[in-house]
Image (cartoon, helix red, strand yellow):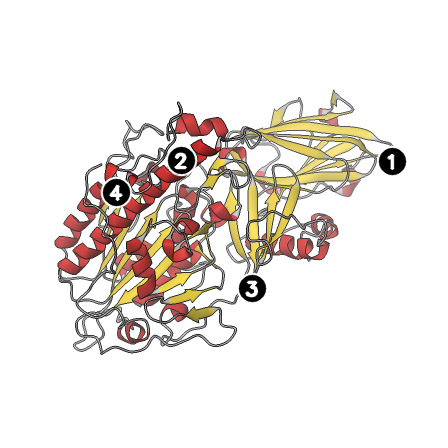
Amino acid sequence: MPGRPPDPGGGIRFRRAASVLLAAVGAVLTACPGGGDRGAPVRPDIIFIVVDTLRADHLGCYHYARPTSPRLDALAGDGTLFESAWAAAPWTLPSIMSMMTSRYPSGHRVENDGLKLAPDVPTLAATLGASGYATAGFVSHVYVSASFGFDRGFDRFEDFGLSGPGYRLEARMEPPADKVTDSALEWLAGRKDRPVFLFVHYFDPHWPYDPPEATRKLFPSSYSGPLDAGYDSISKFLDPEVPIPEDYKQFLIDRYDGEVRFVDGQIGRLLDGVRDGHRSAPLWVVVAGDHGEEFKDHGSMGHGRRLYEEVVRVPLLIAGYPGPGAAGAVPTGGGSAGSGVSVGGGDRGRRVTIPVSGVDVAPTLLDLAGAPPLPEAQGRSLAPLVAPSRPGTPPPADRPLLSETLRLNAFRRAVRIGPLKLIDFMDQNRAEIYDLAADPAEKRDVAEQRPDDRRRLMQALFAQADLLSVGWNLRWNGDGRPHRFQGRVTTTGIFRSIVPLFREQGRYLLEKGNTLIFNDPAQAGESGLSFTTLPYEAIETFELLIDGRPAPESVILGGLAVHPDRMPFDLRGAPPSDAAFDRPPDAALKPPCFRMWRTRPAGRNEPVSLDDETRARLRSLGYVQ
């Protein structure tokens, strides 16, 4: 992969001194949406860079000992570094879509392959474009391509053919960082009359780890075994039960660090090109990771299934640079006690400890650009933290943050409030809790010792994520004697959430993302579960058994209390759509039996419409208040 070698140090090196930052930029960059008034502040250029698979703790500015990131370290010294930034998902597609929409994956619904952003969901690029910005995106993986709706709002969108019919995953068809940089600079050179929003995505740190020789030499490896740094070799160790040889793991880390250093140099080349282009506008530069990478930290490799910090904690750097007409140097100022902001001396810049999220990126950039906010955004603007002179209130340190995944048959959600973090393993019906202040490596699960915190975090998870809207309610009722209730539910789509309504002996299992199997072996009373699937039009097929026997006559569907005429059965056209949202009447109960109905849909920021029985059951299990 040819390209200029990384710059050994230095910041963007604009004509103005790097000390002219933050407070001055905040004053200068108060945007004028029309942009036409003589003497009105010039709207800033915005460069938003996402580096795929970038662990925060593999950058020097996040205290990594190896020289992987001299240009990013300098950028952090120029601006603001967020110590506790969370990815909204542990893999590329939903994570970057959350940055572009300010919605969590359960909000924008692009949660897995085959799903595309709905046309009525507003995006960062479209909003900036409507506000007068020239917009361009240059991306290097299919999961950030037009196939999923990422091109919306861009005047120029280049995915280098990755959305074409010939693309194949793991075939090494992604463009290297130098090619992406070349295309971005070529576009930027032709922009003179409008403020620009440039989105650049670099894929290189993702496996296969194959950095160019220049950066590979910086992290030499002594490994001489038969394995390489490609998917086929790495995948042998995805199973947490399979140990990885230490020399091979170090070899992978060496190659990964070489990729990080290569991208760091290309980011430097991109920003140097901005300087050489002699643009006169002020500039905001944002660099973020979409997710991290596992190197057996918690037993596995890669990313996508797990929600531990090595995957969800990502770098987030924001730096502002005044244009040539800005005022002189102004000190950045310090944070007040308890503000979550610390300001070091010299070139250390600002370090923010308040937890923030990828959903905060779009509100922040729109705020800094003076553009309208996204409707129904789930994030908050971080502008008061990066430009203290700007009006606004920073997000509170105890705001609940989410990270979610449906990837690779894992159905998991994490919620964080301050230092406390809960991981809900929906596919395994269990939860873990970690105190990140006392245990940043997440080695001690304290869920059993802290039931009150578990209840509080689970309630925050339900309050934030749309887990039950338009989902199915499946209940089984005993007659006072133990019965075995079991079943299999398949969908033509994918399961997106499962909420067990039992804490007794009942169990469930997900297979292949589209099959739910449950077994309640000795139930004398009532139990059940609720689930949702994507897309909404997916067809669900049910096979329900009582004491091992198919019993269609014991299944009650919707408010009309009809029965299926066979087993298994699907619900195309039965019960009628309106009646499907009504719980079967109590008069229809003849235990032992199953009851089924659908939860009514809820609009954004509206509570899910639950019947009293379901709400009481959720409350008894500690899910809702």
Q: Position of residue 107 (x, y in %)?
A: 48, 50
Q: Position of residue 113 (x, y in %)?
A: 42, 35
In the displayed structure, 134 sits above or below 282; it is above
Classify residue 556 by image quadrant.
Answer: top right
Judge left or right: residue 12 versus residue 255.
Answer: left
Amino acid on which the number 2 mark rests in the picture: Leu
Compute the Cα span from label 2 to label 4.
Answer: 19 Å
Classify residue 526 by image quadrant.
Answer: top right
Element type at mark 1: loop
Residue ID for mark 2 = 252
Q: Quadrant of the C terminus?
A: bottom right
| Residue at the spot 75% in from the left edge and 51% down from the top edge | 620
Compute the Cα span from label 4 to label 3.
Answer: 37 Å
Q: Earlier in the sequence, mark 2 or mark 4?
A: 4
Residue ID for mark 1 = 480
Element type at mark 4: helix
Between 73 and 429, the one lying in front of the other is 73
Classify residue 595 by image quadrant.
Answer: top right
> Which callout, 4 or 1, points to the residue nearer the camera?
4
Q: Earlier in the sequence, mark 4 or mark 1?
A: 4
Amino acid on which the number 4 mark rests in the picture: Ala
Q: Does residue 542 appear in the picture of this structure?
A: yes
Q: Position of residue 557 (x, y in %)?
A: 67, 35
Q: Earlier in the sequence, mark 3 or mark 1?
A: 3
Residue ID for mark 3 = 398
In the displayed structure, 560 sits above or below 310; it is above
Query: Residue 177, labelled with which disc?
Result: 4
